[in-house]
Image (spheres, grey):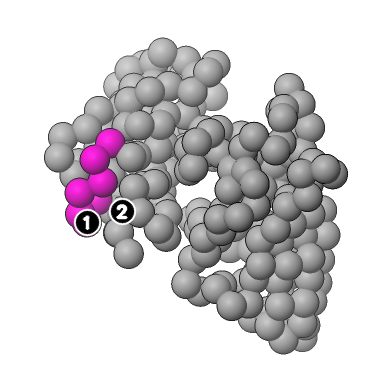
Amino acid sequence: EVQLVESGGGLVQPGGSLRLSCAASGFTFSSYWMSWVRQAPGKGLEWVANIKDDGIEKYYVDSVRGRFTISRGNAENSLYLQMSSLRAEDTAVYYCARDVGEAVTDSWGQGTLVTVSS
Amino acid sequence: DIQMTQSPSSLSASVGDRVTITCRASQDISNYLAWFQQKPGKAPKSLIYASSSLHSGVPSRFSGTASGTDFTLTISSLQPEDFATYYCQQYHSYPLTFGGGTKVEIK
């Protein structure tokens, strides 16, 4: 069974940094593209970034490019999202997701809440 | 960026009803269209990819069709567990973009 478990969310001040993690199990992690998708309170879904199985190719939504970095540790079966220069508008539940091929999402984690506030 | 416009934004329906949700892309995305279901306080669930292919385990009452830049999600006979918000997403071009969502409520 595919399992994706996010961690690392919490309250952070504007301008601060946070690192999210996603622990994957139940599949061969190193064979899949992975994504981060977020959802602001009461709002819709927003794709944030994805990363190729080997970690070489990465793509970002414009609003986070240069502030967020997606990475992965295939030996640890883990996906990461390093977030810096955080803004109030980054407040959201962040979901880790598995992609079949480059961008077909088939599995989701339960999400971790990031709140950016002073 | 490709804009995805969903309609309606909400609808009320009864158990057993046939429900149709539409998603329009602002430009050609071929069939690179996915549908997701989300219940309150829960993670999204993947339903359909490539506009009409069901993910494993998704009931056959869900179906998807495409016509040009218009895409449709149909629930043939609404069940109690289907009351949720549905999102479309294009994965033809970066950034990947979602529609605004359609909330299906109980009439």
Q: Residue at x 71, y 43 (%)?
A: A110
Residue segment shown in magenta: B24-31
Question: Farthest residue toward the top?
Answer: B60
- Residue where numbered disc 1 is placed: B26
Does residue B26 appear left or right of residue A109 in this picture? left
**Camera-nearest residue between A37 and B76:** A37
- Whether residue B4 appears in magenta in the rendering, the answer is no
Q: Residues within 10 Å of mark 1 (few under 14, many from 20)?
A: few
Q: Residue at x 19, y 44 (%)?
A: B69
Q: Residue at x 32, y 64 (%)?
A: B1
Residue B41 seen anywhere in this rendered image of the structure: no
* Contact flag, marks 1 and 2 (Cβ < 8 Å): yes
| Image position, residue A115 (x, y; %) | 73, 70
Location of residue A15 with respect to B30 vertically, above or below: below
Disc 1 chain ID: B
Does residue A29 appear left or right of residue B81 in this picture? right
| Tags 1 and 2 on a common chain | yes
Q: Which mark is residue B4?
A: 2
Disc 2 chain ID: B
Does residue B81 appear left or right of residue B9 in this picture? right
Q: Residue at x 25, y 28 (%)?
A: B65
| Image position, residue A69 (x, y; %) | 66, 67
The secondary element bearing badge 2 is classed as strand
